[in-house]
Image (cartoon, grey):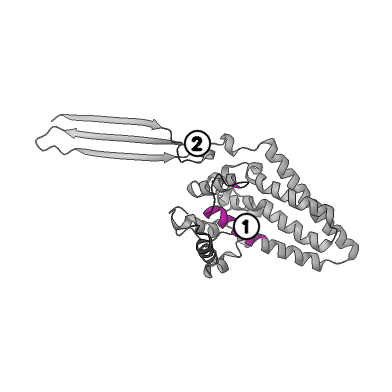
Amino acid sequence: MAVQLRTKYTIIPITNNTPRSHRPSLSRLRAICSVNSTAAKPRPNREKLVVVVNPLLSNDPTLQSTWTHRFWVSAGCTSVFASLAKSVVAGFASHLWLEPALAGFVGYILADLVSGVYHWASDNYGDESTPLVGTLIEDSQSHHKWPCTITRRQFANNLHFLARGVTLTVLPLDLAFNDHVVHGFVSTFAFCVLFCQQFHAWAHGTKSKLPPLVVALQDMGLLVSRTHHVKHHRAPYSNNYCVVSGVWNKALDENNVFEAMEMVLYFQLGVRPRSWTDPIL
């Protein structure tokens, strides 16, 4: 019996229909093996294996921070710190602490809700050509295909877009208002919005590799945890959108709030959310 073995390996780069942020490090490995026998009763056996690999290289330039990224994160942190300082100084001067503390708590709770609405919208509507937020939408779609990429992004790379929005919003408020209650709300809300992508990244991190304080805050429910957020990346992919503390997720999902919003947008504007057609989302 003669046995012929034919093995074929090809490395084929795939860039079509692949987000730009993943093209430098993405390849497709196609291995085709066939075994043919010349015996009386040949039983050819042909197997195909296709493996899509995303190695998430740490030196991928799309995951690294630039000086522009660092500038905006620094500016955002500075504007938030200035707002917090105004609240604290005014609180000392007036000896009133309950009001700004309550305002800060409201800001923290509201930031979680806003993160969920923002996450839902970027997951389901728009594309890379959408003005102002196209890059953000593209990254959001890519995140569902390669969830762990967010853990490899450098700090400023992950936060710079939201930091820019926080800077341009909070800085004028720093200049216009001195009220300690206003800044109690603004500083906490802006801080949570600025860092929500970092909270999101920690929710994808390995618990043993996270800072102990982060793990403690996750266990207390003050930050969204991996156990809580992982449900968002399982079918039906349309729940648990909030990524600050996740406190709103149960109420939003049990009352089908986002599903109702999708129906309203569909009947009013004729726009379908991606979650209706994309099995990944």
**In this orientation, does residue 97 appear?**
yes
Residue 5 coordinates in the image, percent (x, y): 23, 30
The image shows residue 48, relative to residue 218, as above or below, that is above
User: Element under label 1?
Assistant: helix
Q: Residue at x 40, y 32 (%)?
A: 12
Residue 52 coordinates in the image, percent (x, y): 41, 40
What's under tag 2, amino acid-wise? Arg
Does residue 264 appear left or right of residue 187 in this picture?
A: left
User: Element under label 2?
Assistant: helix
Most prominent secondary structure in the magenta stretch? helix
What's under tag 1, amino acid-wise? Ser
**In this orientation, does residue 147 appear?**
no
Residue 238 coordinates in the image, percent (x, y): 50, 60
Q: Residue at x 80, y 64 (%)?
A: 100
Does residue 235 appear left or right of residue 203 in this picture?
A: left
Q: Which residues are magenta?
A: 111-133
Q: Which residue is mark 2?
A: 23
**Mark 1, other Cα within 10 Å: few <14 / some 14–19 / many ≥20:** many
Q: Give the CA separation, mark 1 to mark 2.
A: 28 Å
Q: Which residue is mark 1?
A: 115
